[in-house]
Amino acid sequence: MKAMVLTAPGELVLDEVARPARGGRDVLVRVTHSGICGTDYKIFNGSIPVRYPRIMGHEMAGEIVDAGDAPFAAGDKVIVDPELYCGACFHCRIGQTHLCPNGLLLGRDANGGFAEYLAAPATHVFALPGAIDPRAAPIIQVLTTCLHAQRQVEIFPGEYVVVLGLGVTGQLHAQLAKARGATVIGVTRSADKRALAETLGADLTIAGDGDAVRKVREATGGRGPDVVIETTGVVQQLAAAVAMVRSGGRILMFGIITAKEGALPFYDLYYKELSLINARVAKSEDYPGAIGLVERGLVRLDPLISDVMPLAELKTAIGLLGSDSSGPRMKIVLEHGLN
Amino acid sequence: MKAMVLTAPGELVLDEVARPARGGRDVLVRVTHSGICGTDYKIFNGSIPVRYPRIMGHEMAGEIVDAGDAPFAAGDKVIVDPELYCGACFHCRIGQTHLCPNGLLLGRDANGGFAEYLAAPATHVFALPGAIDPRAAPIIQVLTTCLHAQRQVEIFPGEYVVVLGLGVTGQLHAQLAKARGATVIGVTRSADKRALAETLGADLTIAGDGDAVRKVREATGGRGPDVVIETTGVVQQLAAAVAMVRSGGRILMFGIITAKEGALPFYDLYYKELSLINARVAKSEDYPGAIGLVERGLVRLDPLISDVMPLAELKTAIGLLGSDSSGPRMKIVLEHGLN
Amino acid sequence: MKAMVLTAPGELVLDEVARPARGGRDVLVRVTHSGICGTDYKIFNGSIPVRYPRIMGHEMAGEIVDAGDAPFAAGDKVIVDPELYCGACFHCRIGQTHLCPNGLLLGRDANGGFAEYLAAPATHVFALPGAIDPRAAPIIQVLTTCLHAQRQVEIFPGEYVVVLGLGVTGQLHAQLAKARGATVIGVTRSADKRALAETLGADLTIAGDGDAVRKVREATGGRGPDVVIETTGVVQQLAAAVAMVRSGGRILMFGIITAKEGALPFYDLYYKELSLINARVAKSEDYPGAIGLVERGLVRLDPLISDVMPLAELKTAIGLLGSDSSGPRMKIVLEHGLN
Amino acid sequence: MKAMVLTAPGELVLDEVARPARGGRDVLVRVTHSGICGTDYKIFNGSIPVRYPRIMGHEMAGEIVDAGDAPFAAGDKVIVDPELYCGACFHCRIGQTHLCPNGLLLGRDANGGFAEYLAAPATHVFALPGAIDPRAAPIIQVLTTCLHAQRQVEIFPGEYVVVLGLGVTGQLHAQLAKARGATVIGVTRSADKRALAETLGADLTIAGDGDAVRKVREATGGRGPDVVIETTGVVQQLAAAVAMVRSGGRILMFGIITAKEGALPFYDLYYKELSLINARVAKSEDYPGAIGLVERGLVRLDPLISDVMPLAELKTAIGLLGSDSSGPRMKIVLEHGLN
């Protein structure tokens, strides 16, 4: 089959490789669309090391080719959960499969979706309703991570929720919080992203500059929001979240902070009785809910696609990801062009 | 002051009585609007006995006349939480003030709101935002009981919620579930109430006949809803809730069942692993949230008012409540006409 | 291999049958000990129909014979979770594997543990720490069902928990509630079971007669317990639970009620704001916790064994189960006699 | 009455002052015992500024002198919740009275318990059961803060809980976690405190040196504890908590961190999916539970008293608090010596 193969950091070629073998519990999927994620960018440039050659890609939609024993039929449209787990470790045994230390991410620790075909365990493959555009379907993987995170944060209708950062995950969090009845305020430097968030239902957006904390407090009756969802992964933004949230509020640390330094206002965490909630990836159990959210129109994915490109142009597409994150670029979807 | 005074069961007269004294922790409120509830009907006809003479009425809105030490100003528009508690018993001491065995309901155990003036503890008086129509404001008391109940039931966006019965509380529950992102299905015999629910955002309504369980299951992909909110207080409807809900779902018993007999499908409770959740009245703590829901338009109250009458016609109004509950009548609001 | 085979209701013979084949995800276990449950009794007498011939038994401990790909070694002592699930249905997909409508119970819907060997999925096999007596290990399956149920009931140290019925599950619930810091009161007609409960840590036991509600309320400061765990499956006991529990308390319906009639005090459910919590079987995820409870001595199983008999005497043993449940008999454990 | 009056930082004198007036909702209490807290030390030395003259002291027990309208009798033994709240602000209105921005701490923002008499709202006064030693009763205020915090952290029997720091609050947390069925490991530099923790039921204690993380992981099967309760308020200890806790575990930040700098291992928070839970003071609603824990022997206070001194020696006693925290000194209780 054809696949985009990473042979070394920065070395990405369209190649002919063996079609993946379908194991006993697997289904074989023809990949029709895939999304590119920041993780792919880091694997590509070598900052996340992998074993080469590697086929990247962990956001993908496609069609069943061989269902094996699973209750699918050839041609069924599906998406794939790329987070595999061992099933035997402590975490798997207590149901925290997403924290399995032996887990593999397809597209990083095993071959992934930037290819014609993919084999995946039937437990990780989910039927895609006809109402969902297959081009947007790879983004559901991203949505599951937002859903998994928001399950850990109480939000009641009428509460104020601020989303810091309005990239793809920020836009998804804003929509999900809106679906939960919140009054949603988005904060970002990007005028384009603010406009998009407002189109998608945010009640208010605010420029992500030095005045953001003050403006958010003003917009929330002087008290501060009930919940802040931090999606940028920048320590200073987390500190801003602590500063703006009301006492007794909740903070979801969604953006992954890779910085090793950076002071947190510890005393305020105490004084305002704030819990910092972290969430990592998602569980397979989050997929039915995420699919339902999209199917029922509670979360819209299509407007998050800024570029559609052929799979063969993956290298160009990944290059685009490296540009300024304050611009209008959102999700790049690849059409595998082989349909 | 003028007040509607119940001197014996069925004996309700407009009379001149002493204005209530404002105790040390109280504010004095001029009542401008009040709502009539089934409890008033039962007090009126004697099936809930009270000490006579009694001024009924526990859903009320008005204006501050004398704020005492409380942070209100004369003329402030307010609503009143009529559920007083002792503050000293076990339940009050652990924060379950709504279960206080020494509690008083204004309008039943002490004089209430069908009068020109009312004195109430400042802790039980809440500012009414300008955006909320004072005519609809008495219904917020009813909304607090729905909010208190739904706080005990997890509902995640995209889940199916069925509301059995679409009277005032059913319509409020449907709107609240919708605000939480649910796909809402209302069930009632009344075509008028179905139409109203659809106007207020229900995704689907179903006739409340012998086919309702089957139709609900069909409308929920054959599986049954995730949550059923029973508002009728009829045992057979509770049994229907058990029959229709999916395994692992939740049932909120909101309608008060006064019947002493009536079989429940106990084995199904086990087999489907269903919890039956009960909720009683509300806590003062539920008022800010309920007010916010109305202020932000997440719950609409105005369409629930079917009649506006002068306070002096209370007896006629209560008589209307006794008529067929399957008709179009919803909340009757009294204008105290003394403004 | 040798197995006890049920060929028809009441027809149970020691026979030579084929050793079970180990499927791709299975491990093969030599069963050394098994427990007999009320479900076995009902299968035996035909009130739970099965396909014949059938090897019953779903509480079992043994040793690994063939681990396949799983991280076990031959000779490892293990227990087996007998509740299999399909992995593909809605419930499995959202993580409610214990509610899988396609699930099989080993020993009822497929061959079980009253035999020399058993094949089971590796995901359903759990290592048994050396500190746990293999004779008592089959009872861990029962403990998982109690653990699964109590996970759904908040109990805070210092609260009063009443356990109605002190059979095997009642004794387990009492110990688990005690481990959670509760003051535990057990209620049963059986003097022997009361004595056993006190030996195992219950703070108080009360005779299960018409005075029990009054005595429980007296023993709980006149207020009633915070939690009642009903293990008898008798509607009248559930009504007693409602009568004795304090307002705002919780009731766990653990005993399976098969009666179709029987009035519940519905109004009290409302007035006391009581939730009725149901739980069904357990999830594989409950096994590590249950094993840990026994390993650390928080729950003692050995005193719950009233009889140890050879596997070949299964028919006699099952007969003993049919006798008066108010007597001293607790769990009957079978030694497979092949060690 | 006699009182210890702070007239300026470091200036503490036994003086004759007016007995406090009992307001309308208050009871008048003769203080018999009080405890000294680190906050008193900071008020004394001026690092927490107050308005002078000020009577410090917020941990106190005594007897009712004048109950006003409250259901107490003269001579009743009581303890006092020193955290007053306004009842009118947003936080009070939603039930987060402990976060009231207008709240007063008796002994800091208003006169407190280092005196013969104290007036306090009846809602803040709790009957002390006869089984509790009045000398130890002031420590119940400290216990409420631990209880309030642990209510926000799930702990299931059989889980590993590590307590970092074994001062008074560490010893209370360790006992409370033990009461919840945890296997408790205490960590401190102090050999005396380790011995005390073991006496009070800790399963294991470990020296709080550079090897602590490794030793804790070893003692928890290589995996790390399920929960870490950090009581020292030192950033490096919080980082150690993150390092030692298992993935998917919980961290309670109980020690108040006043440092403004200090790196947290942010990436590990994500990778291990850790939530950092903060808790501030307590609610009045936590008192009945805390009293019950002591009454039933689940938490022992007497062994936490290291010194009993007369009230008149308060200045000496506060000086002792300033000494090395790694020593054997625990709670200093003052006898008001006026009984």
Image (tube, coloured by chain):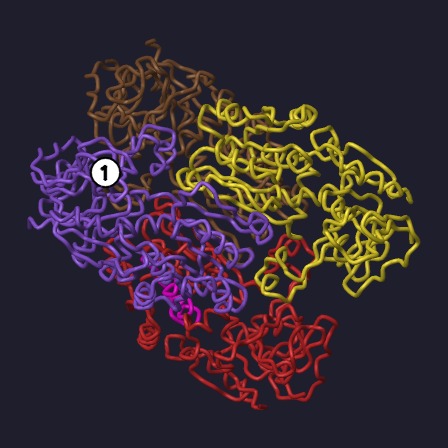
Chain colours: A yellow, B brown, C red, D purple
Which amino acid lies under the numbered mark 1 shown in the image of this protein? Leu
Q: Based on the picture, tell me whether residue C172 belongs to the magenta stretch.
A: yes
* x, y percent for residue D140: 25, 51
Left or right, D324 with respect to D3, comes to right
Chain ID for label 1? D
Which quarter of the image is occupied by the C terminus of chain B?
top left
- The reply, left or right, for residue B176 in relation to residue D3 is right
Badge 1 crowding class, 10 Å Cα cut-off, few under 14, some 14 to 19, many 20 or more, is many
Q: Foreground residue, A246 or C169?
A: A246
In terms of secondary structure, where does tag 1 sit?
loop
Going 77% across and 46% down the picture, which residue do you hit?
A45
Residue topped by disc 1: D106
Above or below, comparing residue D220 to residue B192 in the picture: below
Verify whether residue D259 appears in magenta.
no
Task: Provide residue A54's location: percent of width, then percent of height.
Answer: 82, 55
Task: Find residue C246 and report its horizontal and vertical position in percent.
Answer: 32, 51
Magenta-colored span:
C158-180
Q: Quadrant of residue D102?
A: top left
Relative to the observer, which residue lies in front, D28 or B171? D28
Task: Identify whether B178 is placed above or below C4.
Answer: above
Residue A152 % position (x, y): 54, 46
Q: Is residue A138 above or below residue C236?
A: above
Between D127 and D186, the one lying in front of the other is D186
